[in-house]
Amino acid sequence: MSRIRGKNTKPELRVRSLVHRLGYRFRLHRKDLPGKPDLVLPRHRKVIFVHGCFWHAHAGCVRATRPTSRVEFWDAKLNGNVARDAATALALTEAGWKVLTIWECELKDEVKLTKRLRRFLKTKAPAERGSAGAKQPRPTAEV
């Protein structure tokens, strides 16, 4: 288990790339927030977790099968992960953050995932807002 990475995994990198292409900028793994979310969008008060289906026991997913050896160990470990995830999400929600969990199996359909990210972020992306510093001309009344 020491070789299992917790940061910069392939699923996380794919989600980061999608969010960046949508025009959002974010921080990574902020230590001052519960659970050290994978992506943090401070301006929007939103966080995104990218969970592996096996390690976080994604209910109903074929990738989330439990090992048949050392059953007690794996049940305790995976159930503990699920409980910790729920507590983390609750703590973030109570602190005023919106939380989105993206599962590893959801990365197969990039179009569906992009729609889900847009819906979650649902503020206009910086590219859609126009130039950040440019002022829009006021309409003038013709005399």
Image: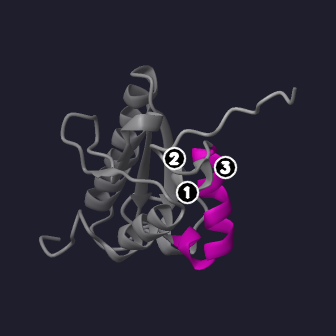
Q: Is residue 116 magenta?
A: yes
Tag 1 residue: 127
Screen quadrant of the N terminus: bottom left
Find residue 94 and report its horizontal and vertical position in percent. 43, 21
Q: Residue at x 66, y 49 (%)?
A: 119
**Label 3: few (<14), some or many (≥20) within 10 Å?**
few
Q: Nearer the viewer, residue 11 or 130?
A: 130
> Is 50 situated above or below 45?
below
Residue span colored magenta: 105-122
Q: Which residue is mark 2?
A: 100
Q: Secondary structure at mark 3?
A: helix
The crowding category of the residue bearing disc 1, from other C-alpha atoms within 10 Å (few below 14, some 14 to 19, many at least 20), is few
Give the label, 2 or 3, closer to the camera. 3
Name the residue: 30% across, 72% down: 9
Q: Position of residue 40 (x, y in %)?
A: 36, 45
The residue positioned farthest toward the front in the image shown: 143
Q: Is residue 69 magenta?
A: no
Way the structure is coloured: one colour
The residues tagged by marks 1 and 2 sit, at their Cα atoms, a distance apart of 22 Å
